[in-house]
Image (cartoon, rainbow, N blue to C red):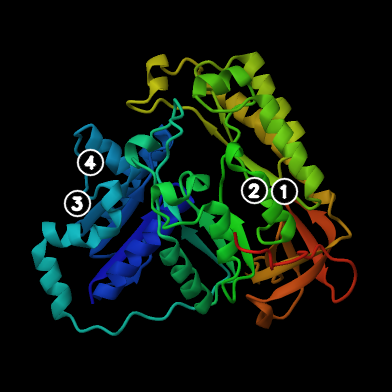
């Protein structure tokens, strides 16, 4: 049986798409093996969000050719699309699949190497194995972005807004529930733009969420990332009702209103903080996570101080700090990269320190409380069970392995270096969703 290996760089959308590509190879008769092993085909789903991501994509291609010099290397994703846009060859890639066509990667492989299709067809193989039930599954509902941030290459690598038909999304959610998944993580490039104008077949994003929450077997709906302007009053109502977990990842990018204007981000520092304040006031167990960029060309010391200020006041549970790098063809590319790497490092470390402080303070808010946890499995070091609360707190506790994928209630007793140590509780006040029966609009 021919072997295929897969790896993903970048976002949850890429992770979802890699899984879909993998399944198409598996159904065709390929044996899926870890990327570190020798394979006949390596599929790399690349990322171009920063120069570091592009460098890692090139390194991953070289790694594949070292694993098996005679293997076919298939490259897709945003870095691949950027190379196509610039009419540049990708060293080490035998097949380059345009980003919009990535789910047809197998067809591109067969088109380039017809003998491989004949080889696979000639090999006897068993039916693809049934996936073992797991806890969380990523479900892509939308692609493309129309915001046009001045630093971002995504509109050039994932052009156009496209929403998956709601019937397709709901059918896939049902299949995921049948496989044992208990939580759906909804993902998209601009997820709040989901709707009838871009192909959903009728519902808007909030209605889709309500429908997904009624899929039998699904306990949680989590949104992977959403722009602050798309956190609508109706979405807040869905979180309050328990249809969506009380955790949102809301990219900040900069705490400076001036830098946000230069980035073409459609909000101000005050807008962002007002939303955070409202979420914390209206939803008691709310957690917020974010992305923050350092070193944008117009970010000076005063502008960076604004980012530190927002990071403190937004009280993030987690924040992903990354450094600006010019992206070919974007408006910000004309400004170059004037902030030295050493200064970007200093700013990254300063934001990381604030992040550790706010995360510790946020976790401690919930000590002594009882929260719902879906058990994901055992930790490798301690032998304890681990899982996430609805509001994204990592919890570890003693319990039977038979509880994996089950819903338990855990009293949060102690903060231990990034996670909470707890104990299974069968009584006491809980942060339980008020209802899962809002009318579908």
> Quarter of the image containing the C terminus?
bottom right
Give coordinates of residue 410: x percent, y percent.
80, 68
As drawn, 12 above or below 281 = below
Which comes before the other along the chain, label 1 or label 2? 2
Q: Nearer the viewer, mark 3 or mark 1?
A: 1
Residue at label 2? 248
Viewer-closest of 432 and 350: 432
Mark 3 / mark 1, whichever is N-terminal: 3
Q: Which residue is mark 4?
A: 90
Q: Residues within 10 Å of mark 3 (few under 14, many from 20)?
A: many
Total count of labels: 4
Q: Quick one: 135 or 68, which is closer to the camera?
A: 135
Q: Residue at x 44, y 25 (%)?
A: 150
Residue at label 3?
A: 95
> Which label's residue is closer to the chain start, 4 or 3?
4
Q: Around disc 4, counting alpha carbons within 10 Å, would you say few (fewer than 14), some (14 to 19), or many (20 or more)?
A: some
Residue 102, x across and y down, in percent: 29, 54
Residue 340 lies, in percent from the top left, at 50, 18
Q: Is residue 223 above or below residue 177?
A: above
Q: Whole-Å distance between the Cαs marked 1 and 4?
A: 41 Å
């Amino acid at each position: 049986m021919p072997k295929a290996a897969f790896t993903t760089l970048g976002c949850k959308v890429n992770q979802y798409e890699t899984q879909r590509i993998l399944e198409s190879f598996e159904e065709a008769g390929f044996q899926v093996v870890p990327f570190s092993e020798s394979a006949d085909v390596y599929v790399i789903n690349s990322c171009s969000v920063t120069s570091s991501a592009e460098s890692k994509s090139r390194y991953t291609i070289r790694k594949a050719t070292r694993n098996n010099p005679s293997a076919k290397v298939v490259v897709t994703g945003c870095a691949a699309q950027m190379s196509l846009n610039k009419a540049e060859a990708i060293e080490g890639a035998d097949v380059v699949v345009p980003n919009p066509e990535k789910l047809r990667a197998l067809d591109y492989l067969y088109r380039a190497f017809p003998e491989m299709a004949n080889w696979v067809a000639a090999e006897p193989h068993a039916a693809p194995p049934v996936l073992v039930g797991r806890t969380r599954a990523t479900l892509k509902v939308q692609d493309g972005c129309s915001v046009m941030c001045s630093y971002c290459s995504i509109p050039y690598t994932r052009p156009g807004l496209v929403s998956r038909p709601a019937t397709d999304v709901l059918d896939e959610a049902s299949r995921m529930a049948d496989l044992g998944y208990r939580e759906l993580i909804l993902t998209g490039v601009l997820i709040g733009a989901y709707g009838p104008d871009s192909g959903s077949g009728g519902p808007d994003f909030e209605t889709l969420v309500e429908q997904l929450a009624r899929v039998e077997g699904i306990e949680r709906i989590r949104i992977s990332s959403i722009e602050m302007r798309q956190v609508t009053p109706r979405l807040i109502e869905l979180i309050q009702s328990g249809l969506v977990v009380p955790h949102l990842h809301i990219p900040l990018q900069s705490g400076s209103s001036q830098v946000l204007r230069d980035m073409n981000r459609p909000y101000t520092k005050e807008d962002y903080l007002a939303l955070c304040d409202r979420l914390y006031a209206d939803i008691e167990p709310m957690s917020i996570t974010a992305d923050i960029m350092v070193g944008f060309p117009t970010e000076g010391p005063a502008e960076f101080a604004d980012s530190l200020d927002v990071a403190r006041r937004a009280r993030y549970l987690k924040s992903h700090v990354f450094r600006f790098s010019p992206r070919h063809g974007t408006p910000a590319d004309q400004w170059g990269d004037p902030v030295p790497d050493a200064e970007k490092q200093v700013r990254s470390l300063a934001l990381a320190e604030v992040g550790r402080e706010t995360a510790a303070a946020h976790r401690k808010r919930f000590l002594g409380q009882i929260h719902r946890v879906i058990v994901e499995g055992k930790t490798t070091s301690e032998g304890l069970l681990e899982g996430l609360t609805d509001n994204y707190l990592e919890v570890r506790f003693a319990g039977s392995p038979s509880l994996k994928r089950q819903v338990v209630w855990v009293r949060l007793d102690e903060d231990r270096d990034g996670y909470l140590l707890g104990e299974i509780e069968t009584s006491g006040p809980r942060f339980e969703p008020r209802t899962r029966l809002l009318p579908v609009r």
